[in-house]
C-alpha cells in the first residue's frame, strides 16, 4: 500500500467514526411504553381479566420484559416487545368485547324464548 492510499484509508476511517459519533443514539421507547401500558389498562377496564386472561397476561409480561430491556439499554428489543404487548392488549380487549356481546345475545335469546313460551301458554288451544 502506498502512502497516498494509506492516508485516504485513514481519512475515510476517521470520517466514518466522526459520522457515527454524530449519529443520534437510540432513545428509550417511552412513547411506545405509554401506548402499550394504555392498551393494557384499556383491556383491563374492558374486562379482559375475565374474558381474555391469557392475552392480557401475555401483554403484561411483554411490558415487564420491555422494562427489563430498557434497564439493560436494549431499546430495540424493548420497542419490539412493547409493540407486541400493545397488539396482545388490543386482542384481549377485542376478545372481551366479543365475549360480552355474546353474553348479551345469549341473555336476549333466553328472554325471547321465555316470551315465546308465555305467548304459547296464553294462546287458546
Image (cartoon, rainbow, N blue to C red):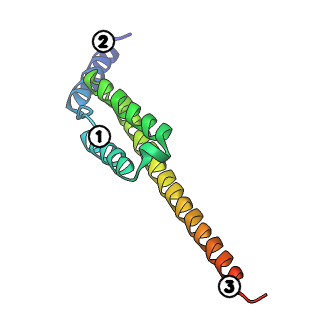
Q: Which image quarter is the N terminus in?
A: top left
Kindly state the secondary structure of the residue where label 1 is placed: helix
Q: Looking at the picture, does residue 62 appear above or below residue 45?
A: above
Give residue 69's quadrant in the image: top left
Q: Which residue is mark 2?
A: 3
Crowd around label 3: few <14 · some 14–19 · many ≥20 (10 Å)? few
User: In the rendering, at what x and y percent does residue 89 appear?
Assistant: 42, 45
Q: CA distance from mark 2 to mark 1?
A: 52 Å
Q: Looking at the picture, does residue 94 appear above or below residue 124?
A: above
Q: CA distance from mark 3 to mark 2?
A: 109 Å
Confirm or deny contact between disc 2 and disc 1 (CB under 8 A).
no
Q: Which residue is mark 3?
A: 122
Q: CA distance from mark 1 to mark 3?
A: 61 Å
Q: Looking at the picture, does residue 123 appear above or below residue 34?
A: below
Q: Which label sits in the foreground, 3 or 2? A: 3
User: In the rendering, at what x and y percent does residue 93 appear?
Assistant: 44, 51
Identified at 30% across, 12% down, the residue is 3
Q: Which label sits in the foreground, 1 or 3? A: 3
Q: Which residue is mark 1?
A: 33
Q: Looking at the picture, does residue 119 appear above or below residue 91?
A: below
Amino acid at each position: 500500500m502506498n502512502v497516498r492510499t494509506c492516508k485516504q484509508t485513514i481519512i475515510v476511517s476517521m470520517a466514518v467514526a466522526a459520522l457515527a459519533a454524530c449519529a443520534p443514539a437510540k432513545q428509550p421507547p417511552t412513547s411506545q411504553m405509554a401506548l402499550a401500558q394504555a392498551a393494557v389498562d384499556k383491556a383491563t377496564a374492558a374486562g379482559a381479566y375475565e374474558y381474555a386472561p391469557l392475552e392480557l397476561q401475555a401483554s403484561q409480561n411483554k411490558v415487564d420484559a420491555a422494562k427489563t430491556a430498557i434497564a439493560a439499554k436494549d431499546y430495540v428489543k424493548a420497542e419490539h416487545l412493547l409493540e407486541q404487548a400493545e397488539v396482545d392488549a388490543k386482542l384481549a380487549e377485542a376478545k372481551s368485547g366479543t365475549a360480552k356481546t355474546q353474553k348479551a345475545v345469549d341473555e336476549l335469546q333466553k328472554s325471547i324464548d321465555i316470551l315465546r313460551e308465555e305467548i304459547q301458554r296464553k294462546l287458546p288451544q
